[in-house]
Amino acid sequence: MNPDGLRVAVTGAARGTGRLLAEAFVERGAHVFLAARDLAAVEQVAEQLRPRGRGHADAFRCDLAAPDSIRAFGASVADATPQLDVLVNNGALYVEGYDLGDISDEQIAEVMASAGTGTMLVTTQLLPLLRKSSRPDIVNLISACGEVGHHRSHAHPAFYAAKHAQAGFAEILSHRLRREGIRVISLFPPDFVQDGPRTADSDLTAQSVVDCVMFAVGQPRDCFIREFHFEQVQP
Ligand SMILES: NC(=O)c1ccc[n+]([C@@H]2O[C@H](COP(=O)([O-])OP(=O)(O)OC[C@H]3O[C@@H](n4cnc5c(N)ncnc54)[C@H](OP(=O)(O)O)[C@@H]3O)[C@@H](O)[C@H]2O)c1
């Protein structure tokens, strides 16, 4: 891939996989718009990434559970760039729990809002900018929890539901945007570790997830990879 000059937005970029994704794009020369609900935290990350590569890093506030915040983020990105080449829908609130009542009503609503509604609203806001790109990609970090029949995660049922919402959104979007040449690339990883050995008997690592994203985005424009699914290590 030659991401030199690519314009890339990443949600949930203040830590974890979102931060790693932003870093990978900056190191390869892209101009990355990092978004997170904690502006100070994401500004600090952008500051750290700037000297890391040939690219640029700008920080924005975006609370995926708050439509106003998403609209403001969309407007700020539109002020900063005439087009967007890659949107990475990474941010999503994760909460564990076996029983529905293990978390509060407010937490259930926030889990659904951040992954489900938030992904849809960010995509809605940024689609006009993606439509101006000659190589637009929408990447969705979903989860094995969004696969039919999956039950191995300790995530709360609201997280399963939110990831199914994301998966359903991604599936119809991929179909409908295909004729415009906009690729919708979704990853369904099982629980993975941020750091760890990258061997066959080990858990999937965040770096391998990032490498899958870079691979898919780097494919020629006739190659619409729609989904990545992963075989989990046997317990
Ligand atoms: N880690 C895994 O095992 C795993 C497995 C499968 C899929 N995934 C998916 O991969 C993506 C990244 O994973 P991760 O491991 O980095 O996740 P994580 O450690 O659970 O972090 C979640 C990210 O989402 C952000 N977020 C949560 N609520 C938000 C909100 N209302 N508005 C904006 N951002 C919000 C968090 O930001 P704050 O810093 O503000 O909290 C954080 O950056 C997520 O979509 C996750 O569901 C992860």
Image: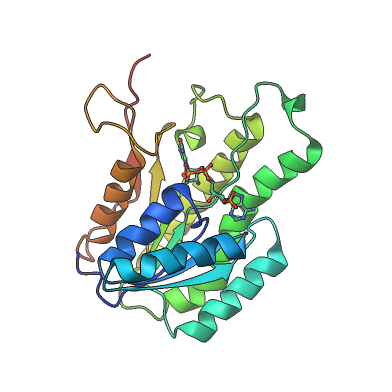
Q: Is residue 136 visible?
A: no
Image quadrant in which the C terminus is located: top left
Image point 63% across, 30% down: which residue? 156
Which residue is drawn at the image coordinates 39% and 39% (left, top)? 194
Q: Is residue 227 visible?
A: yes
Q: Position of residue 42 (x, y in %)?
A: 53, 62
* Residue 34 vertical placement versus 76 (above, below): above
The reply, left or right, for residue 193 in relation to residue 99 is left
The location of residue 202, given as percent across then percent down, is: 29, 25
Q: Residue at x 58, y 74 (%)?
A: 74
x then y, percent, for residue 23: 35, 60
Name the image quarter holding the N terminus.
Answer: bottom left
Residue 146 location, x and y as percent? 50, 37
Compared to residue 17, the image places residue 124 above or below, namely: below
Q: Would you place residue 22 above or below residue 51 in this image?
A: above
User: For residue 192, which quarter of the picture?
Assistant: top left
Q: How is the image coloured?
A: rainbow
* Residue closest to the far right: 105
User: In the image, what residue occupies the spot 64% across and 54% down?
Assistant: 117
**Depth check: 90 or 49 in front?**
49
49, 154: nearer the viewer: 49
Please indicate whether residue 136 sits to the left or right of residue 197 in the image. Answer: right
Q: Nearer the viewer, residue 65 or 176?
A: 65
Which is more toward the observer, 49 or 135? 49
